[in-house]
Amino acid sequence: KQEVTQIPAALSVPEGENLVLNCSFTDSAIYNLQWFRQDPGKGLTSLLLIQSSQREQTSGRLNASLDKSSGRSTLYIAASQPGDSATYLCAVDNAGGTSYGKLTFGQGTILTVHP
Amino acid sequence: EPEVTQTPSHQVTQMGQEVILRCVPISNHLYFYWYRQILGQKVEFLVSFYNNEISEKSEIFDDQFSVERPDGSNFTLKIRSTKLEDSAMYFCASSVFIQSKQYFGPGTRLTVT
């Protein structure tokens, strides 16, 4: 059974810092990995999707990497801003068997960027 | 940019009552999903749906739950007889293809009293 873990559970940084959020998964047989942002009481906004054949994806100040064999992904946020404050979730889509887009989520990292 | 929409945003119901949560997926998407998030816990997969059939469901999705696409635009989740432990945020999602990016709606907060 796939298990997804995110470290740290919470992170507080001053504005302007570069930071790294970590995600690990127990079963390396995945189709893809998605990073989401969740604001309090709101839905999930997809940030980046990395296919299993890819090593990284970039969008603006965000860069996500994937090391499928070791079961790890990182989300790098450059020059953090107070508007980046949110919970960041990673989710994996398992390959094989009869998986039909079922995402398995981590518990999230709560990020606070203070001015 | 097209969005997934969900109604209502908040639903309060009494234990044992039936509820229907509604979603309008993005119009050209073919795959539809329901997830839930109990307060303070992980987001959990409930069910995936394609071509008017359930593709996959989790162990949470028991006989009390059902999904339907009654017309070309709506996708609904019905809980037949709600329990206190069904209180959660319910998210609908859709994707163009299986294993492509999933787009989530804003959620319906269900409170069972």
Image: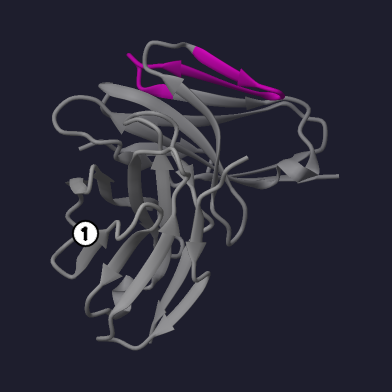
Q: Does the magenta stretch include residue A70?
A: yes
Q: Does the magenta stretch include residue A86?
A: no
In the image, the segment drawn in magenta is A56-72
Farthest residue to the right: give it.
Answer: A115
Q: In which quarter of the image is residue B92?
A: bottom left
Quarter holding the N terminus of chain B is top right
In the rendered structure, the answer to whether residue B6 lies left or right of residue A99 reads right
**Rendered residue at 36%/53% (across/down):** B35
In the rendered structure, the answer to whether residue A19 lies left or right of residue A70 reads right
Quarter holding the C terminus of chain B is bottom left
Q: Is residue B87 above or below residue B17?
A: above
Q: In which quarter of the image is residue B30?
A: top left
Where in the figure is residue A36, as x and y percent of width and height? Answer: 53, 39
Secondary element type, mark 1: loop
**Rendered residue at 28%/85% (across/down):** B17
Label 1 environment density (alpha carbons within 10 Å; few <14, some 14–19, many ≥20): few
Question: Which of B67 and A114 lies nearest the eye of the viewer?
Answer: B67
* Count of labels in the image: 1
Where in the figure is residue B94, as x and y percent of width and height? Answer: 41, 43
**Rendered residue at 34%/88% (across/down):** B14
Q: In which quarter of the image is residue B87?
A: bottom left
Question: Which of A87 and B23 lies nearest the eye of the viewer?
Answer: B23
Question: Which of A11 and B22 lies nearest the eye of the viewer?
Answer: B22
Where in the figure is residue A63, as x and y percent of width and height? Answer: 61, 21
**Rendered residue at 76%/33% (across/down):** A80
Where in the figure is residue A23, as x and y percent of width and height? Answer: 45, 31
Q: In this view, does A7 lie above or below B82?
A: above
Write down the residue under mark 1: B60
Residue type (three-letter) at the residue carrying disc 1: Ile
Q: Is residue A103 above or below residue B75?
A: above
